[in-house]
Amino acid sequence: MSQETEDVNAAIDAELQLLDPRVRASRALAAPLLDPEFVEVGASGRRWTYEEMLDALPDLDGGSGSGEGDRDGPRFEPSGMGGVVLAPGIVHLTYETDFGGRRARRSSLWRRRDGETGWRMYYHQATPVPTAAE
């Protein structure tokens, strides 16, 4: 397996972790997956920073607000996830999600800095898919 394939697979694994309700409900599990310089432009158009996201994540879609993860509630269902290495230490992922019938197209930039072993989400954007686009 090539280094580029390994890097893309590692970023995909980390992205899937961030969609897991148990991770979303736990600051301790989510924090190592987000870059300290993280920024998100959500499907609502809101801009989120690292601290804002970590504070809000348990109460956002796919979390539970209980700190334990909601195993029975709606979950993000990703599809078509793929990625490319843009430069050493930078992976771009794209995919779609369905969350209780609401679809969004998503784009994430993951980076791994020199001396670090794990990948961290640096940027994320979600764009709602209008029903008519189906």
Image (cartoon, grey):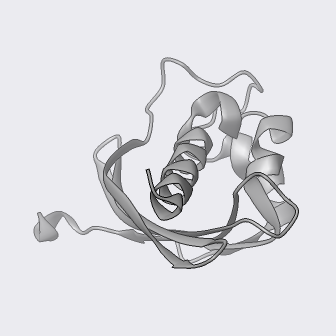
Vertically, is 93 above or below 97?
A: below
Residue 32 place in picture, x, y as percent: 81, 48
Question: Residue drawn 67% across and 39% down?
Answer: 24
Vertically, is 64 above or below 79?
A: above
Residue 102 place in picture, x, y as percent: 32, 52
Query: From this viewpoint, is residue 91 visible?
Result: yes
Nearest the camera: 114 or 133?
114
Taking the view exactly as shown, the residue that stands out farthest to the top is 72
Residue 107 place in picture, x, y as percent: 46, 70
Query: From this viewpoint, is residue 124 visible?
Result: no
Question: Residue drawn 84% across and 58% down?
Answer: 116
Vertically, is 73 above or below 125?
A: above
**63 horizontally vs 101: left or right:** right
Q: Quadrant of the C terminus?
A: bottom left
Residue 127 place in picture, x, y as percent: 40, 72
Question: Residue drawn 78% across and 34% down?
Answer: 26
Taking the view exactly as shown, the residue that stands out farthest to the front is 1
Vertically, is 101 above or below 50?
A: above
Q: Quadrant of residue 133?
A: bottom left
Question: Residue drawn 52% across and 53% down?
Answer: 6
Nearest the camera: 45 or 119?
119
Q: Quadrant of residue 81?
A: bottom left
Give the number of callouts. Answer: 0
